[in-house]
Amino acid sequence: MSEPTNERYELFTDGACLGNPGPGGWAFILRQSDGQEVEVSAGAAQTTNNRMELTAVIEGLRHIDGSAHVMLWTDSEYVLKGLTEWMDGWKRRGWRKSNKKPVLNVELWKELDTLAQRHRIEVQWVRGHTGHAENERCDQLAFAEATRQRDENG
């Protein structure tokens, strides 16, 4: 991991899927320490909820130039545990789980690993749909993208 700059960010993320698999959407809000923020969302015609959760984090980290201290807020236990508990073991085992089966969504996990090595990331889990303003906003954006994907792609 490179030494992070003094720049600090808060990254709020969410993914949504209408069916699993099905049309999906992801969203993030990236807030700089000076209060400036950006919202970004997009979707995929056929995907899974876990892929959308991972994509939201990846795309949010891509928006940060250089290295920084990032407080990541997610309602996804998959993302939380992947980053804080599972990833080191997966890498030691050649991207295999403890049962020797390949890690699902491995290309996304590898990309997230590469991005995470640039930053000092702290992960904070937030229970979804409990009134956390940024999580609720990301959920709205991700759901809107999933709905758009469904409507555009049948």
Image (cartoon, rainbow, N blue to C red):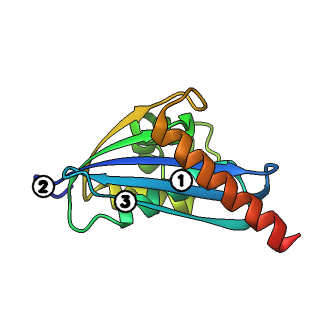
Residue furthest right as drawn: 154
Q: Residue at x 68, y 52 (%)?
A: 143
As helix, strand or loop, the secondary structure at mark 1 comes to helix
In the rendering, at what x and y percent does residue 31 appear? 31, 52
In the rendering, at what x and y percent does residue 44 appear? 69, 67
| Crowd tier of the residue under label 2, counting other residues whose Cα lies within 10 Å: few below 14, some 14–19, many 20 or above | few
- Give the side of residue 102 with respect to residue 124, left or right: right
As helix, strand or loop, the secondary structure at mark 2 comes to loop
Residue 102 at least partly seen: no
- Give the side of residue 151 with respect to residue 35, left or right: right
Amino acid on which disc 3 is placed:
Leu
Residue 87 has which mark? none
Which one is in front, 71 or 98? 71
Q: Quadrant of the N terminus?
A: bottom left
- Give the side of residue 31 with respect to residue 47, left or right: left
Residue under label 2? 3
| For marks 3 and 2 on the same chain, the one whose residue lies earlier in the sequence | 2
| For marks 3 and 1 on the same chain, the one whose residue lies earlier in the sequence | 1
Q: Residue at x 12, y 55 (%)?
A: 3
Which one is in front, 44 or 84? 44
In the rendering, at what x and y percent does residue 148 appear? 74, 65
| For marks 2 and 1 on the same chain, the one whose residue lies earlier in the sequence | 2
Amino acid on which disc 2 is placed:
Glu
Labelled pair 3, 1 in contact (Cβ < 8 Å): no
Tell me how far mark 2 sits from mark 1, CA to CA. 24 Å
Residue 16 at least partly seen: yes
Q: Residue at x 41, y 59 (%)?
A: 60
Residue under label 3? 61
